[in-house]
Image: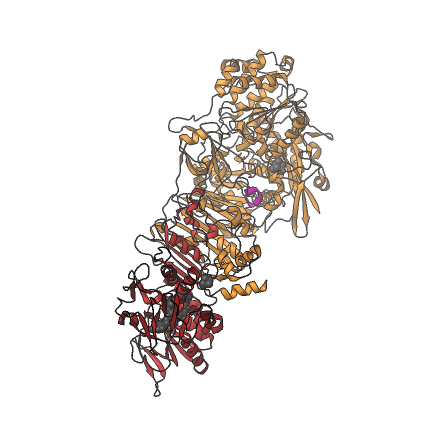
Chain colours: A red, B orange
Amino acid sequence: MTYSDKPRLVFVGNGMAGTRTLEELLALAPDRYDISVIGEESCGNYNRILLSPVLAGEKTIEHIMLNDDDWYQQHRIHFYKGERAVQIDRVRRQVITASGRQIRYDRLVLATGSRPSRIPVPGRDLKNVLTFRDINDVNTMLALSRSKRHATVIGGGLLGLEAANGLRKQGMAVTVVHTADFLLNRQLDATAARLLQHTLEQSGIQFMLNAATARIEGTAEGEVRQLVCSDGRTLKTDMVVMATGVSPNIELADSAGLRCDRGILVNDVLQTFDPAIYAVGECIQHRGQVFGLVAPTYQQARVCANQLAERGFARYIQTPAATQLKITGIHAFSAGQFQEAGSHQVIRFVDQQEGLYKKLVLDGNQLVGAVLYGDTQDGAWFFDLIQQRTNIAPVRDQLIFGKDFCHWPQPASSALPVAA
Amino acid sequence: MTKRSTCAYCGVGCGIEIQVGPEGVTGVQGDTGHPANYGRLCSKGSSLDHTLTLEGRLLHPQINGLRADWPQAIDHVARELQRIIQQHGPDAVAFYVSGQLLTEDYYVANKLMKGFIGSANIDTNSRLCMSSAVAAYKRAFGEDCVPAAYEDLELADLIVLTGSNTAWCHPILFQRIKAAKQQRPGMKVVVIDPRRTATCEIADLHLAIRPGADIALFNGLLQFLAQHDAVDKDYLQQHCEGFNAALHQAREETPDVAAAATRCDLVPADVAQFYQWFAETPRTVTCFSQGINQSSQGTDKGNAIINCHLATGRVGKPGASPFSLTGQPNAMGGREVGGLANQLAAHRDFNAEDLTQVGTFWNAPNLARKPGLKAVDLFAAVGSGQVKAVWIMGTNPVVSLPNAGEVAHALRQAELVVVSDCIATTDTSQYAHVLLPAAGWGEKDGTVTNSERCISRQRAALKPSGEARQDWQILTDVARAMGYADDFSYHCAADVFREHAALTALNRAGPRQLDLGDLAHISDREYDDLPPRQWPLINGSSQTRLYADGRFSFPDRRARLLPVQCQGVKNAVNVDWPLSLNTGRIRDQWHTMTRTALAPPLNAHKPEPFVEVHPVTAARFGLSDQRLARIRSPWGQAIMKVNVTDAMRRGELFVPMHWNDQWARGARIGELVNPVVDPVSGQPESKHTPCRIEPWLPQWTAIILSRHNLPLPACDYAAKIRGARFYRYELASGETLPAFTGSHDLPAFLQQLAGAEAPPPLLYQDQDRRSYRGAWLDDYGLQSCIYLGSGWDPTVTQADRHWLASLFEAGTLDPIQRKALLSGLSPAGVEDCGRTICACFGVGENSIRKCINDLQLTDAAEVGKHVKAGTNCGSCLPEIDAILAQK
Ligand SMILES: Cc1cc2nc3c(=O)[nH]c(=O)nc-3n(C[C@H](O)[C@H](O)[C@H](O)COP(=O)(O)OP(=O)(O)OC[C@H]3O[C@@H](n4cnc5c(N)ncnc54)[C@H](O)[C@@H]3O)c2cc1C
Ligand code: SF4
Ligand code: SF4
């Protein structure tokens, strides 16, 4: 390794946010920094989102690799693969890894992401109680699916359903245990959720709703045997996947004295309380908010890269995020404040025969939320309308039918966002 | 095989060739050999085959709503009639018949009532269209005789069309006039009508006359003719009575052109022009129709016109006659047999000589000795209980009579209401105790007479549907069951016709013109082959014109001019009722639409009931075009779509007469019309009723298109329009929907409105805009769809009816059609972007392929730049690469 006199930039975490920041930076200022990347995972950078299709057997790991070792080399990046950063010495400006390596920085980007949270019930540490976050998890599940029959997924959120779908595709009998009375209760409304549940049931997945897990019981060998709910219902199972939310990885920052709450606190340019240290992705907390989707992460990456390249004054502004469920053949979408409240007005459309459902939530003349099920083609367009705060009054009666049916009268057409 | 017959609709009486295949009627076309039309047909005639549907037909007799067989039904009617006659006398029963009946039907009905039951209470809906003309002819000529023939329209140098929207009501005559005028551009046409109708298209002069002022115009003409030495003094002296008295009256009323113009609210120069042309054109035909006849002074108006023709000797000469155009296909046949309460039979009256002759001929046991009740009085008598039993044949008085609400009320009172009709549910049939299925057009067999006295055969091309029978057969069976078998021994229509012809032959001894004597002994075969012929038919000759020799039908063979005075309309407009309501026909509907509304092509022209109003009047009363308005008169009210048009005079409204409770709600204009009749003819004044109008704001409006024929929903305004493979319903209601306040099961309400079996599987709801839409689809495609909104909801008013209609022919809807369905708008121009590839940005496979092809792209990043696909999470990049690789 040769050291140059360029300022040293170090990334901790080579997940989606960190790498995207790096890519953006390289596009803006390829030679500005001497760059190091410390990544705990034992491979290059891959598209985490696509772990679901990998689990479902629709894609392989190779398909979802974004940047392999060559890429790091090409860009003359020092890539510490499979190394965990354990300490930041802010006085000496160096990061110390688990293997004791000390890596000096002039600027540091923390992109440590988050980790699945396990619900605090007895039996959560039994063998074959898993989570779903990275390639290791996927490989474990794939291996178990070959020898075991019954799988239980705790959590009927996006991740849980994608896991359930993947395991079913691997031939397992899958039950989803969910606390609320409908699935995706933070992404969909009850109507859309029921349609979704119906479709998934048709494909063979079973559901236990309104079910709070009380404990997980194991065999004498310490392997999962059954799951018991607080209302007494039990479920025989050979494996449990907990998909009950994530918590930001803040320990490294916290121990270095950076201000943290649920996530690492950052300002609008993604700086932590130490001006030399930035943070992006799921590990941060910005204006009270933590993140769980890739879209805001990428916006942060752009702002952060701008900052690092010392280009302009980009600021990170939170925008409503749209939700997509990635199960082949199922189209579900939501964005904005799709649970109507107060003065909101609602437009609904259903096509029971085709299993379609759409709901738009309006506040005055603005679209503020949308739920789509079955036909999500216009999701991105609705999402744009929400973000642009477009006045939809002139097209309200056709709005739900999508872009092709809405024509603003001429003078107002400048208000029309550039179509997605 | 083709059958020659005649059109079922207007009084032009066009000849038709019906093509019959093994499966039934395959088409109709004009009969090139028929003298009325020489092969041409108007839109109504051309669509006749569409009406030959079993849909809505009455197929079996019914007694009190239960199916019965014919012997039961005949027996029931005969016994009930006899019971009522026994208890209350013959005048307690009445027949109300129709100009749609064939001459043979008419003849048997008239004979049964006047000769055997013993009352003259038989009247016809022709009362509503030409009884004033009948009375005027009788007063002037001594007999109800139309002196002219259609060819006079081609021979005339001046045609005056007064009170006749010939273009729409007698389309083939209009075409003949138009063609003649094209050939001889010197020919003049004057149209006298308060409205600028379609007929004005060929007018050299249009006089938009004040309603009810016609007598003043023609009195002014008579005075002008006298002043300008244009009267035929010799003719008057040799052939006429009463000229001086008539002229005196005319001079009093309208001494000069200016006076006439003032009375008629016309420009003096226009009036002078008309008078001038009339004075200097010997070959002048004056056609008059409902605009003259339907008036409290209809008979006087007819005589005012005839006066001018007599004064100039222009009667029965080539290209010169007063020519009344009858409305119905066989109004003339009805006049011939005497199917009016104030005639006996065969142009005979109730004088001693006529009574003896007819009574003897019929061998009548109970000959009626005095005129009976005319249409309006007849139903009034039903209402008052004086008439207990009424048999209605082939007509719909609950719609067509003035003050129609009263008629419905009267029928509810009656002890016995018998309705024979070919349609199962009409506004009238719902009051019937006994329903008798009659053969319809295409099944009927007999004769009709058109406006020029031409008798034509109407031949059956089909067997009667279900158990339907010819009207004359039904009447004959009832007569037999009442004990008159010997005098009603007819076996076929020809038997009836021969008897009718023989009766008219009695006229030969006197001055009367009606004489079909030549046909009294024709064989069945000859009857079947009978070519169209104009009566009188004596000694092997047919007569094109009457009275050319100046010898009229009075005993002294002289014609009469009558002094007539213009009294204007009976109920003048006033502060409370400031507008004048006019009614009439539209081009593509017939009468009360029982048949025409079945023909989709005929419903496209004017699909909904409407009121026409001048822009200034519209502004004054706050009306907007294509919105609804409520019209009120002292007698009733109706709701119609407003049509703002400067073809109207200010202060006047025009409403079509056709719509009724089967095809519309709230649009039965008969309810508003004043029950004022002409004192001589008894014809109602349907062309003027004082009224007012105001905008009517619906609480909600809706349209429904359905594959099925639904009962009309009960709301304030409703119109049903039959299209090809669907029905369309336009609805509006003044009541708030419970759904608007949220306290309502909306899907169930839509289900009920659309007559569906389940709530709509496709449903759109915007509760705050109160916009609701639903659709039902099955394996065959679109079943029905409904669009409902509050007030004048633009999604309802702007829903693309043509596109929606086309979906009923589309079979299973494609994804784009299905997506567009509840938008109500045609997706024309919307492309199917294909299977979604990029979910984040909603980019479809087709869009990606198109972009790649159009811009010759080679890598995914470029695709992303142009259509955004793959630029977010990148999960679709592999698929985009795959598409690129295929290239
Ligand atoms: C199965 C699955 C499906 C998903 N689907 C979607 C989707 O459809 N749409 C969507 O918007 N989002 C989806 N997400 C969420 C999305 O993947 C995350 O929002 C995104 O990955 C966050 O990026 P990040 O860089 O902040 O975190 P990560 O991608 O998790 O990256 C953090 C990286 O930092 C490493 N790291 C952590 N601590 C240290 C340390 N101390 N030293 C060194 N390395 C460290 C971790 O090993 C990890 O590789 C999905 C997530 C999963 C697991
Ligand atoms: S003009 Fe009259 S008779 Fe002739 S086709 Fe038309 S409706 Fe029938
Ligand atoms: S989901 Fe597509 S599907 Fe995402 S942009 Fe992401 S790449 Fe397109």
Front position in the image: A78 or A325? A78
Front position in the image: B340 or A248? A248
Main SS category, magenta section: loop
| Snapshot quadrant of residue A131 | bottom left
Q: Which segment is the magenta one? A: B588-606
* Most distant residue in the front direction: A5
Residue B539 percent coordinates (x, y): 73, 29
Identity of the residue drawn at 47% across and 47% down: B799
Residue B209 percent coordinates (x, y): 51, 24
- Give the side of residue B128 with respect to residue A150, left or right: right
- Give the side of residue A305 with respect to residue B331, left or right: left
* Most distant residue in the bottom direction: A220
Q: Is residue A142 visible?
A: yes
Identity of the residue drawn at 41% across and 28% down: B578
- Give the side of residue B466 with respect to residue A56, left or right: right
Question: Does the segment drawn in magenta span residue B593?
Answer: yes
Front position in the image: B383 or B83? B383
